[in-house]
Image: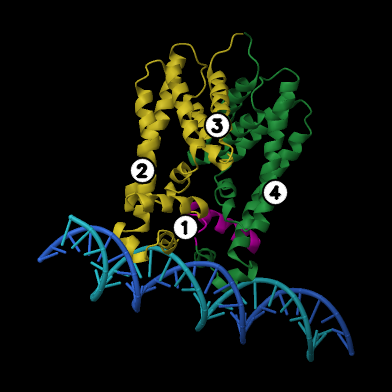
Chain colours: A green, B yellow, C cyan, D blue
Amino acid sequence: METKEKIYRTASKLFLEQGYDNTPMSHIARELGLSKAGLYHHYPSKESLLFDIIDYLNETNFIPILKEAEKISDPEKRLIFFLRRYSEIMTMDASSRIAVHEAGKLKPHHSKIVKQNWRKTFTLIKDAMSEMQASGKAKEISSTFAAFAAIGMCSWTYYWFDYSRKESAEELSETFIEILLRGITKGKE
Amino acid sequence: METKEKIYRTASKLFLEQGYDNTPMSHIARELGLSKAGLYHHYPSKESLLFDIIDYLNETNFIPILKEAEKISDPEKRLIFFLRRYSEIMTMDASSRIAVHEAGKLKPHHSKIVKQNWRKTFTLIKDAMSEMQASGKAKEISSTFAAFAAIGMCSWTYYWFDYSRKESAEELSETFIEILLRGITKGKE
DNA sequence: TAGTGTTTACCGTGCGGCAGGTAGGTTTAA
DNA sequence: TTAAACCTACCTGCCGCACGGTAAACACTA
């Protein structure tokens, strides 16, 4: 494995366990069998290491899903696809928690990039809902709030999910889809 | 105002703005027009100050709602009542974010108490849903996951809600209730 | 293929700064 | 007179980060 990847993995693990602020660079270095200076050879600063982790998570997990979802023309199918994949990521491993929980600690320059990605996610969901409303499929509720409800539902997963019992992951995503889809679609009165 | 309350409010504000780890005691003291030692006269440690804040939030915001909700015998009404009040708290001010976002930094002794409260919230929602399923009102989905969906939806609010535009708070809670209730109830087929 | 630069991947050390927390003295109010 | 409320000054420890090396790998000539 490449050193950069080793660093990335180790730091990721430690940030997850103890939080960014409570993980000194010396600790990460020790875990890698490296000196602190050795670690600084690969990363110019602690913050840049955090950014790399978050950015990598985005690039490998979230962006591909966004790209794939955008190709689906039917808004309902697009929404279902996205929700399923999104909650799958959440149950895969807890690492993506860093992307949310520690993003606030990035410097403006970096946090800007991260926020852009969040924005895209939000827009995708919101637009899908709006389209469903336009075609009469969905109720006339606030698509903004509904979109946040969807994201919140999924993102909250890593605050409680038991990652040692992943066999329930599929049931989880299906439950979320069920609630959200039925929650926004027009019912037969 | 009592000194303890002043400290509580000031620390609360700063923790919210900059996070617990990035707010030194000296900063809190300065903001209060106090010396650091003066602040330590009132609190034995930084962690105990954090606990007091979180515990106070629980006691004043969450517990009363739980107590009141428990009195409602009809599960659907109980659920609606709880969700409405819960999301109202979230939109009132951002302070309750501390209770979630920083709870992990408490020492075991304190975090135990906080977790018990979360447990009660979860149980209330889950039980209400189970009762609705038993009476045939709700679909046979996992009440555990559905309960987490409800909590996540609401709790996520403070990651995005614009607290300068509170006039939308009511629409928010109604949207959430709408989605969740329709999401779990049996539809006419 | 020996000789010569050059880059890469590290190490040991240390510094400046600030954090949480304390010892011990002083003011204030009842 | 006494206890609570506060202050100044300080300790200790750690943290991010920089500096100046070194040894090995690599690249390029002649």
Task: Name the dominant secondary structure of the magenta segment.
Answer: helix
Q: For label 2, count other residues whose C-alpha is less than 10 Å away and answer few (under 14), some (14-19) or many (20+).
A: some
Q: For label 1, count other residues whose C-alpha is less than 10 Å away and answer few (under 14), some (14-19) or many (20+).
A: some
Segment tinted magenta in the rendering: A1-23
Report x, y in % for residue A45: 61, 66
Indicate the amino acid at tag 3. Ala
Indicate the amino acid at tag 2. Tyr
Asked if the residue under mark 2 is in contact with the one under mark 3, i.e. CB atoms within 8 Å, the reply is: no
Do the residues at discs 3 and 2 belong to one chain? yes
Quarter of the picture containing the C terminus of chain B is top right
Relative height, residue A98 to residue B37 (above, below): above
Identify the mark at residue A59; answer none if there is no mark.
Answer: 4
Do the residues at discs 2 and 4 belong to one chain? no
Q: For label 3, count other residues whose C-alpha is less than 10 Å away and answer few (under 14), some (14-19) or many (20+).
A: some
Q: CA distance from mark 1 to mark 2?
A: 20 Å
Give the residue pinned by disc 1: B21
Q: CA distance from mark 2 to mark 4?
A: 40 Å
Query: Is residue B37 covered in magenta?
Result: no
Q: CA distance from mark 3 to mark 4?
A: 34 Å
